[in-house]
Amino acid sequence: MTTTDLDLPRVAEIGKYHVLTEPPRADLLALVEIAAQVARVPMATINLITDTAQHQIATHGFEASICAREDSMCNLVLHEGAPVVVPDASRDDRFRDNPFVTGVLGDVRFYATHQLVTPEDVVIGSLCVFDTVPRELSDEQERALAGLADRVVDLLELELRTRELKRSNEQLAAFAGQVAHDLRNPLAAVSLSLRLIGEELDKRPSEDGAMAYLLQRALGGAERMQGLIDGLLAYARVGAELQRVPVDLAAVLADVHADLATALVGTTLVVGELPTVVGDPVQLRAVLQNLVANALKFTRPGEPAHVEVDSVLIRDRWRVEVCDRGPGIAEDQRDRVFAPLARIDESVEGSGIGLSTCRRIVEAHGGRIGLTDAAYGGTCAWFELPA
C-alpha cells in the first residue's frame, strides 16, 4: 500500500472531528496534562498528522504548533502497530537526525508515542510524551498511557456523535414541522367536511343509520390521525430548548390528575411523595401524563384500573415509578416499546409515540427510563433524574 493510500482515509477521519481549525478543547488539554503526570515528564501533546503536516491540537508544557510532516517524529512510527518508547532519541537511528532532536526544532531525548486509532481502524495521530533528558517508563506507565490514547479517541468520537445528534434533531424538528404543516390543513378540511355531513344527517334522523355509523368512524380516524401528527411533532421537538428550573413533580402530577379527570373516573390512583427536580416543567409534565395515561389502559379482566405513583432516592438520582396492575410486558419486549410507533398490544388504543417521547425527554435531562415488574403484578414504568 502506498503512502497516498494511507493518507486519504486518515485525512478524511481527521476532517470529521473539526479540531484542526478550532481553539484547543479543554477536555483534550486536561487529558495531555494527565499524560504528562503519568509519565512524569514536563511535556505532552496530541498530534494529528495529515498528508502534509503535523498538528498539535492540545499540548502541555509548551506552545502548540504545526510542523511539516517530514519533520515529525511521530510520523516516522505512525504505522508501527504498537506504542514506541525511546529512552534517548539521540542514540536511536530513526530519530538522531530529526530536527526535534538535533536542536533545530527541539532537544528531545526521552520520547514515547501511542497511536490514536479510530473505530474505523484508521491511525490519525498519536498521544506523545517527551523530555529533554533520557528516562524510562514502567510497564504500569505504558499501560496507563495506552489507556489515555484510547480516551483521546473516545473524546473525539463523543463530540462528533453529539454534533451529529444535534444536527439530526434539528433536521427531524424541521421535517416534523413541515409534515405537520402539510398534513394539518388537508386533515382539517376533511374533518370539517365530515362534521358538516354529520350536521346534515342530524336534520334527517330517519335516514339510514349505517351512514351515521360510518361517519363517526371516519371522524374518529381523522382525530386519531391528528393525534398522531401532534405526537410526532412533540417527539421531534424534544430537547430543542430545555428549561432548567426547579420542578415540583407533586404539583405537576396534580395538574396531570386534573387533565385526566375523565379517564380516571372509576379508577384508583395512589400517589406517594414525589421530589422536586431540575428540568423543563412542560416536558416533565408530558412524561408523567404519558406514563399515567398509559398505565390506565392496562387492567386485569373485569377490574378497574389501579395506578400507583411513587419515588425513591437511589444514590444521586431520583427514581419515579408509575405502576399498573395489568397483564404485564414480557421482559424481551420492554426495550422495544420505547421505539417510535412500537406497540405491543394492538387491542389497546394508542399511537406508539408516547413512550418514545418520554425516553427522549428523560435522556435530554440526563436521565434514563425503563420498565420492570410491578409488586402486585403488572408493569412499573420508571424514570430516573439527577437529584
Image (cartoon, rainbow, N blue to C red):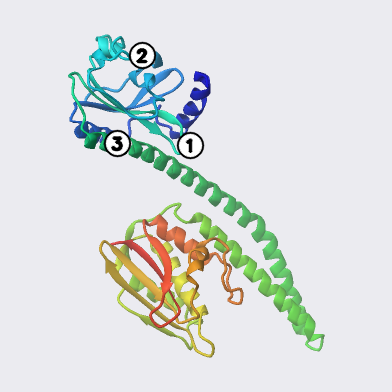
Q: CA distance from mark 1 to mark 2?
A: 27 Å
**306 relative to 102, above or below:** below
Q: CA distance from mark 3 to mark 2?
A: 27 Å
- Disc 2: CA contacts within 10 A as few (<14), some (14-19) or many (>=20): some
The residue at the far right in this view is 207
Res 26 label = 3
Seen in the image, is 159 located left or right of residue 101?
right
- Disc 3: CA contacts within 10 A as few (<14), some (14-19) or many (>=20): few
Q: Could you tell me residue 340's position as x and y percent?
A: 55, 61
For the residue pair 143 and 60, the one nearer the viewer reads as 143
Q: Could you tell me residue 51's position as x and y percent?
A: 46, 20
**381 relative to 280, above or below:** below
Residue assigned mark 2? 71
Seen in the image, is 109 located left or right of residue 178?
left
Q: CA distance from mark 3 to mark 1?
A: 25 Å
Q: Could you tell me residue 315's position as x and y percent?
A: 25, 63
Could you say whether the residue bearing mark 2 is in a helix, strand or loop? Answer: helix
Q: Give the residue type that dot 2 points to.
A: Asp
Residue assigned mark 1? 120
Q: Give the residue type that dot 1 points to.
A: Glu
The answer to whether residue 272 of the structure is visible from this angle is yes
The disc, 3 or 2, on the residue closer to the chain's N-terminal end is 3
**12 relative to 212, above or below:** above
How many marks the image carries: the answer is 3
The answer to whether residue 248 of the structure is visible from this angle is no
The disc, 1 or 2, on the residue closer to the chain's N-terminal end is 2
- Disc 1: CA contacts within 10 A as few (<14), some (14-19) or many (>=20): few
